[in-house]
Amino acid sequence: MLVVYTEQLQIPQQELLIEWRLWVNYWPRSWANTQDYNAAIPLDWYLLFRDQLHGLQWMLRWPDHSRVIYTLD
């Protein structure tokens, strides 16, 4: 299941992704560049879940900022 998360990852989301590291890959979708040193900040994310269960759990926790792009049934 491929999901777009349309916000910056906060601590709770980061901790969950680290815990689920065997079931999910994630990478930045877009960046914001600022004038600060080394300050390219990911604005939103692609999340690729290896199973539907973890993808559905993510969607239930953050439905307002998550959108399913692709799923294998």
Image (cartoon, helix red, strand yellow):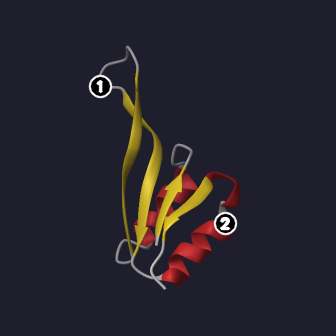
Residue 33, image x, y percentages: 38, 23
Q: Residues within 10 Å of mark 2 (few under 14, many from 20)?
A: few
Residue 6, image x, y percentages: 56, 47
Q: Residue at x 40, y 19 (%)?
A: 34
Using the image, tell me which numbered label, if any, was put on residue 24: none
Q: Residue at x 46, y 73 (%)?
A: 1
Q: Residue at x 31, y 19 (%)?
A: 37
Q: Quadrant of residue 61?
A: bottom right
Amino acid type, label 2: Arg
Nearer-the-camera pick, 43 or 3: 3
Picture layout, residue 21 above or below residue 66: below
In the image, farthest residue toward the top: 35
Amino acid type, label 1: Asn
Disc 2 target residue: 61
Q: Do the residues under discs 2 and 1 have CB atoms within 8 angstroms?
A: no
Picture layout, residue 28 above or below residue 4: above
How far is disc 2 from disc 1 in space, using C-alphas?
A: 31 Å
Q: Residues within 10 Å of mark 1 (few under 14, many from 20)?
A: few
Residue 38, image x, y percentages: 29, 25
Disc 1 target residue: 38
Q: Secondary structure at mark 2?
A: helix
Q: Quadrant of residue 29?
A: top left
Closer to the camera: disc 2 or disc 1? 2
Residue 20, image x, y percentages: 43, 73
Q: Secondary structure at mark 1?
A: loop
Nearer-the-camera pick, 52 or 41: 52
